[in-house]
Image (cartoon, helix red, strand yellow):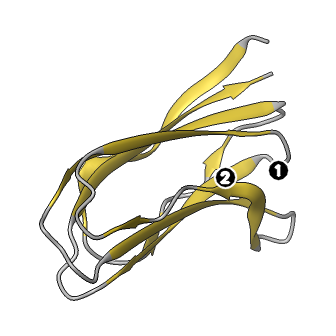
Amino acid sequence: MKVVKTGTLLSSQAVGASAYTEGLYVGDSDELLVFFVMTAQGTYTDETLDIKLQTKDPDGNYYDISGAAFTQVSGDTGTTSEMKAVSTFGSVIRACIAVTGTTPAYTFSLKFYAKG
């Protein structure tokens, strides 16, 4: 398979609140490889970070992509990385980022290859 598009859902930055990334057009790709890389984290006790990928339907509504949730980061885990390969999605994707806790601040990025 050839790489159709490379892109960034979230540039490396500190995230301390729940948010959605901007929806990105990935076209008629057959597979996505999405990379989560966390480079910094404070010392926490009750904070968590959850990231899942979503796709957009023709009416503009977003839905979770089955099997496209990254492993939850909790407590003080240091740096970590993970890749998800996804083969069922629409032409637009985004990340749903859920952050909980007293004073969370996770520094991470989300990048992808869309393959056709």
Q: Amino acid at mark 1?
A: Gly
Q: Is residue 8 visible?
A: yes
Q: Is residue 3 left or right of residue 36?
A: right
Q: Secondary structure at mark 1?
A: loop
Label at residue 5: none
Asked where in the image residue 16 lies, by quadrant, the reply is: bottom left
Up the image or down, 51 lies above or below 92; here it is below
Q: Front-most of 57 and 87?
A: 87
Asked where in the image residue 74 lies, by quadrant, the reply is: bottom left
Residue 66 on image: x %, y %: 79, 59
Residue 46 on image: x %, y %: 27, 83
Residue 108 on image: x %, y %: 31, 49
Q: Residue shown at 24%/52% (left/top)?
A: 13
Label at residue 90: 1
Q: Is residue 102 left or right of residue 28?
A: left
Label at residue 93: 2
Q: Residue shown at 43%/73% (left/top)?
A: 19
Q: What is the C-alpha distance between the residues marked 2 and 1?
A: 7 Å
Q: Secondary structure at mark 2?
A: strand
Q: Residue shown at 55%/55% (left/top)?
A: 70
Q: Amino acid at mark 2?
A: Ile
Residue found farthest to the top: 2
Which class describes the residues within 10 Å of circle 2: few (<14), some (14-19), or many (20+)? many
Which class describes the residues within 10 Å of circle 1: few (<14), some (14-19), or many (20+)? many
Is the C-beta separation of discs 2 and 1 under 8 Å? yes
Q: Residue shown at 79%/12% (left/top)?
A: 1
Q: Front-most of 71 and 4?
A: 71
Residue found farthest to the left: 43
Q: Is residue 98 left or right of residue 54?
A: left
Up the image or down, 87 lies above or below 97; here it is above
Q: Front-most of 99 and 28?
A: 99
Q: Is residue 52 left or right of residue 92?
A: left
